[in-house]
Amino acid sequence: MPAPTVPAFGGQRPGAGSGFPGAGPHASHLPQGSDPRGSSLAGAGRRTLRAAFGLLGPRRDRHTVAPGQLSGLSLPIGDDGVVIGIDAANQPAVLALSRPVRLDVVLVGSMWLAQVLSLRAAATGARVAVETARPQSWAPMAQAAGGGQQCVTVHEVGRIAPQGPSVHSPVVIVRDCGARPPRSRVAAQSWQSVVTLLPYLGPTAPRLLAGADVVGLQRVSPEEAEVIGRVMGLAEADVAALPTLGDNVTMWCTRRHRQFVMTQPTDAETGLLGPARRVD
């Protein structure tokens, strides 16, 4: 499978007056699979369109699959990603956790949000392995996920084994090891993403933030916001917004983009995990 060209997470541009913090002219969007030339393709003529989308293929008969052959098909997980909420334009925001390239994610926030992401990643077909210092808090979610299949496993800190990721069986590793997580025995690689959960900024947080591909930020203190702003190169408006975020709003950012996302749990997620919260 060729490596995709879409960014790690995507959505529409937040609009002014949307109720999201930071929405306005400085808000950035991460479109999934869009062409940076935008609407200019529409008026560039037939020749330009063919250049953008590739050469026309050979004229052959269509392939068909008989109803009895459908059960024999095996489709690998692609790079569409996990719906993590909606953006300021009320459009789905997607985090591509199953990728043919490594992806390190740092989430400064709650176990509630990490568990929602884990449930949704498992629903896309990924295997989720949780390395945690509080296994009793993860056990109910792990047992409920997968409809009886063991798609979420819980491991003590330092006891997680290699997971053997592949295109047909991608893996998401969630590290819930406190504010000073030890070095992991498993690392991000092809078809294996690592999500490191930090309840607040510890001594190693600047290093983890600087090395992450994607950072998720729930509400933090003004002092923490200043540190994050320096490490991530955030605008002053974004730094000022971080201490004011609601319990279900997260700012997802990279070095070049940022996006506010509201996570709305389903009825099943609320029944299992409770309402959205910043502190567990």
Image (cartoon, rainbow, N blue to C red):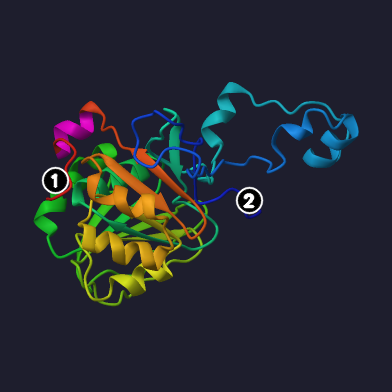
**Residue 196 shown left or right of residue 86 in the figure:** left
- Asked if the residue under mark 1 is in contact with the one under mark 2, i.e. CB atoms within 8 Å, the reply is no
Q: Position of residue 143 (x, y in %)?
A: 18, 45
In the picture shown, does residue 263 fall above or below 101?
A: above
Residue 5 numbered tag: 2
User: Residue drawn 46% across and 35% down?
Assistant: 14
Q: Main secondary structure of the magenta part?
A: helix
- Between 146 and 230, the one nearer to me in the picture: 230
Precedes in sequence: disc 2 or disc 1: 2
- How many residues crowd mark 1 within 10 Å: few (<14), some (14–19), many (20+)? few
In the picture shown, does residue 56 fall above or below 133?
A: above
Which SS class for mark 2? loop
Real-space CA distance between mark 2 and mark 1, rounded to the nearest whole angstrom: 37 Å
The region drawn magenta spans: 268-273
User: Residue drawn 51% across and 35% down?
Assistant: 12
- Between 121 and 24, the one nearer to me in the picture: 24
Q: Position of residue 192 (x, y in %)?
A: 44, 60
Residue 140 numbered tag: 1
